[in-house]
Image (spheres, rainbow, N blue to C red):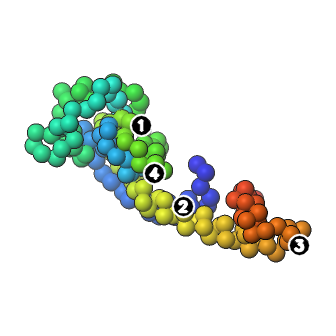
Amino acid sequence: RGLDEEQETGVLNAMQEMHVPSGAVVIRQGDVGDYFYVVESGLLHCFIRKEPMPEDWFTDQPAGRFAPGQVLQQRDVPDLGTMVTACPAGSSVGELALMYGHPRAASVVAIEPSTLWTLDRITFRTIILKAAHRRRTMYENFLSSVPLLSSLSATERSKVADALESKVFE
């Protein structure tokens, strides 16, 4: 939401399309969050399990359950916990992964064949930080050219630059 036009364009250009079949596990509760997903079409359901997932659910071994990308049988869905929300086209999941990389708070399963757009945390942070650095440099250069602010130290000018917000008008 808080992205400027440059950052928004960078994020949109970095997203990759992903097709998932009905029943596919998109996110497992407890996994480290690395990706953000936007639902273009289809339907996802989010499930939260109150007790921790058994350790064997976090392996890719044949005994493990609910691996990302695995297609679940209907009988497995209750094991994921309580369904807490539906994510139709136009919604998104996993935004905390972009900023913090926290463990996933829920499991997300495709209820219908779905088309998702994905963005990984490293790419997102790189886009945001590069754009923020360019903007800050531009603001500091501008502020140093304003006669009224010439008495500010570089540190003070930097603080003012950090406080500036850009607004776009037609």
Relative horizontal placement of residue 170, taking residue 50 as reference (left or right): right
Identified at 55% across, 67% down, the residue is 130
Frontmost residue, 6 versus 43: 6
Element type at mark 4: helix
Q: Are marks 1 and 4 in contact (CB under 8 Å)?
A: no
Q: Amino acid at mark 1?
A: Cys
Frontmost residue, 144 versus 42: 144
Mark positioned earlier in the residue sequence (1 or 3) = 1
Element type at mark 2: helix
Q: Which mark is residue 128?
A: 2
Residue 111 image offset from top left, x and y in percent: 30, 36
In which quadrant of the rendered image does the C terminus lie? Answer: bottom right
Mark positioned earlier in the residue sequence (3 or 4) = 4
Label 2 to label 3, Cα distance in Å? 31 Å
Q: Which residue is mark 4?
A: 98
Q: Which residue is mark 1?
A: 87
Give above or below for 136 relative to 17: below
Give above or below for 51 relative to 5: above
Element type at mark 1: strand
Mark positioned earlier in the residue sequence (4 or 2) = 4
Label 1 to label 3, Cα distance in Å? 52 Å
